[in-house]
Image: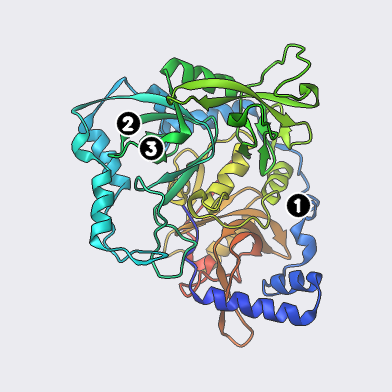
């Protein structure tokens, strides 16, 4: 997915920073103290305007609409991590479905914990039984649906949060991804209790709560998806439908950057859900009826919401402005915490300009559809630094489990914006100091350390150029 493992010492580092800031006595001092540990970082660098101004061709189009369409087609054709759920046949081989479930629902072999303590074999047995693998028929009849609210994708059909270490509760090992309203899915299997569905979306297969999926015909789901692809797009970090007591099923629905939904013409209606529609956008959302069936309803989004009629132009300035809309958002492993992780972050930024990226860092770093520069393990540091000096705004820099987006250079130093649980720096005295970044941050590249596992530069594995 995802981001660098956060050592437990980050909590101690965080408290030390807070105490130091508190001694300075003001909220602005707190902010200054919290960024002072990052080498070379000035508060002016926390604005996209700083980086846009440094680009001589900030508004030049990198890929036009035709080139983006070709790139997305190549991504769907060549990248094995990208799926086409609506193109699946009506029936699938049951053995294949079982293989897909077992690929994500792997019984943990290392100790795992909840907030109540270590997970015992009985709990693991129960989760394995919940998969209902024995109920998969030889031929699986597919069903289709649309996600109605932001929904977690889980490794097992359970909402129980599971951790690698006691107290390290930010990284839920059963959290795989999240799907957003309007996402089409193919439903392949149901958990033993009927509360969860194993689904395939465009970028992931995992378990989703059945209550968050409305089931309909393939044709109805495909028609909605086609109309959504031509509809308005969320260009803010998030947008929300208005609070609508008259229609609670479409009230206060959170939408993420890059989500597109069908446009609805209110046909001169004087009121929609108790509100004049002319002061906002009217879009269509999928609704789950009491029996789980799919229906549709118009919904209102305030005119003030950060949305556009079409994908934004793919320029360096656009990428910078879009990325900085997430600055300071809490890190959310696997799109947890109602947020996103490192690969989810760059995916959302690029989706706002209409570009499809794979979900996880491993797939992003190796995608054959992008312009990949491999960084071999034995590549000298001098060559690695040269690659970073040549990197352009929007280029994606990878290391094991993490991705960063280049935003520019200052004095020859490459700078990135990324969503990270934490990194470390070396003090003047040589000590390695963990930083509890735990969100979307701006950092240089060369001074940063991946915990106690070496420098970011030395751990680079690839650079992907989306251009």
Position of the C terminus, as image quadrant, is: top right
Using the rendered view, name the quadrant where residue 466 is placed.
top right
Q: Decide: is 2 above or below 235.
A: below
Kindly give the residue lying farthest to the top in the view shown.
267
What residue is at 41 percent from the left and 49 percent from the top?
159
Q: Is residue 406 left or right of residue 106?
A: right
Q: Position of residue 323 (x, y in %)?
A: 67, 48
- Mark nearest the camera among 2 and 1 is 2
Cα–Cα span, label 2 and label 1: 43 Å
Q: Decide: is 27 above or below 363.
A: below
Res. 119 visible in picture: yes
Quick one: 287 or 155, which is closer to the camera? 287
- Mark nearest the camera among 2 and 3 is 2
What residue is at 22 percent from the left and 33 percent from the top?
136
- Residue with the mark numbered 1: 48
Q: Which mark is residue 188?
A: 2
Q: Position of residue 364 (x, y in %)?
A: 48, 46
Q: Earlier in the sequence, mark 2 or mark 1?
A: 1
- Residue with the mark numbered 3: 80
Secondary structure beneath dot 3 equals loop
Q: Decide: is 219 above or below 385.
A: above
Q: Earlier in the sequence, mark 1 or mark 3?
A: 1
Q: Which mark is residue 302?
A: none
Q: Are marks 2 and 1 in contact (CB under 8 Å)?
A: no
Q: Earlier in the sequence, mark 2 or mark 3?
A: 3
Bin the neighbour count of mark 1 within 10 Å (Cα to Cα): few under 14, some 14-19, many 20 and up: many
Secondary structure beneath dot 2 equals strand
């Amino acid at each position: 997915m995802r981001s660098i493992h956060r050592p437990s010492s980050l909590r101690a580092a965080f408290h030390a920073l807070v105490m130091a800031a508190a001694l300075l006595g003001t909220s602005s001092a707190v902010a200054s103290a919290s960024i002072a540990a990052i080498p070379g970082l000035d508060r002016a660098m926390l604005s996209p305007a700083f980086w846009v101004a440094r680009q001589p061709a900030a508004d030049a189009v990198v890929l036009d609409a035709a080139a983006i369409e070709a790139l997305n087609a190549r991504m769907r054709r060549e990248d094995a991590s990208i799926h086409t759920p609506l193109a699946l046949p009506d029936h699938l081989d049951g053995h294949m479905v079982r293989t897909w479930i077992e690929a994500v629902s792997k019984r943990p072999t290392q100790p795992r914990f909840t907030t109540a303590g270590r997970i015992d074999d009985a709990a693991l047995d129960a989760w394995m039984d919940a998969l209902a693998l024995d109920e998969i028929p030889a031929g699986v009849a597919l069903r289709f649906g649309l996600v109605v609210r932001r929904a977690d994708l889980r490794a097992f059909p359970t909402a129980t949060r599971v951790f690698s270490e006691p107290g390290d509760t930010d990284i839920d090992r059963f959290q795989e991804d999240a799907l957003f309203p309007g996402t089409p899915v193919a439903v392949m299997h149901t958990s033993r209790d009927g509360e969860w569905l194993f689904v395939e979306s465009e970028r992931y297969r995992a378990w989703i709560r059945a209550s968050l999926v409305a089931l309909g015909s393939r044709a109805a789901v495909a028609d909605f998806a086609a109309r959504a692809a031509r509809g308005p797009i969320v260009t803010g970090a998030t947008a929300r439908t208005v609070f609508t007591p008259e229609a609670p099923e479409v009230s206060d629905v959170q939408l993420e950057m890059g989500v597109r939904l069908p446009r609805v013409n209110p046909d001169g209606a004087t009121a929609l859900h108790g509100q004049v529609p002319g002061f906002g956008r009217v879009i269509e959302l999928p609704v789950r009826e009491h029996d789980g069936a799919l229906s549709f309803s118009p919904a209102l989004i305030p005119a003030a919401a950060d949305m556009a009629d079409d994908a934004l132009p793919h320029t360096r300035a656009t990428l910078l402005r879009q990325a900085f809309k997430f600055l300071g958002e809490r890190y959310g492993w696997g799109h947890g915490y109602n947020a996103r992780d490192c690969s989810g972050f760059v995916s959302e930024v690029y989706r706002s300009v209409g570009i499809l990226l794979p979900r996880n860092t491993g797939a992003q770093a190796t995608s054959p559809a992008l312009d990949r520069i491999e960084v071999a393990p034995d590549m000298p540091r001098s060559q690695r630094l040269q690659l970073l000096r040549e990197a352009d705004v929007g280029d994606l820099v990878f290391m094991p489990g993490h991705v960063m987006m280049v935003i520019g250079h200052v004095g020859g130093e490459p700078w990135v914006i990324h969503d990270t649980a934490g990194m470390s720096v070396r003090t003047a005295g040589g000590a390695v100091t963990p930083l509890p970044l735990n969100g979307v941050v701006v950092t240089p590249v060369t001074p940063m350390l991946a915990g106690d596992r070496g420098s970011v530069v030395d751990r680079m594995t690839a650079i992907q150029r989306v251009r």
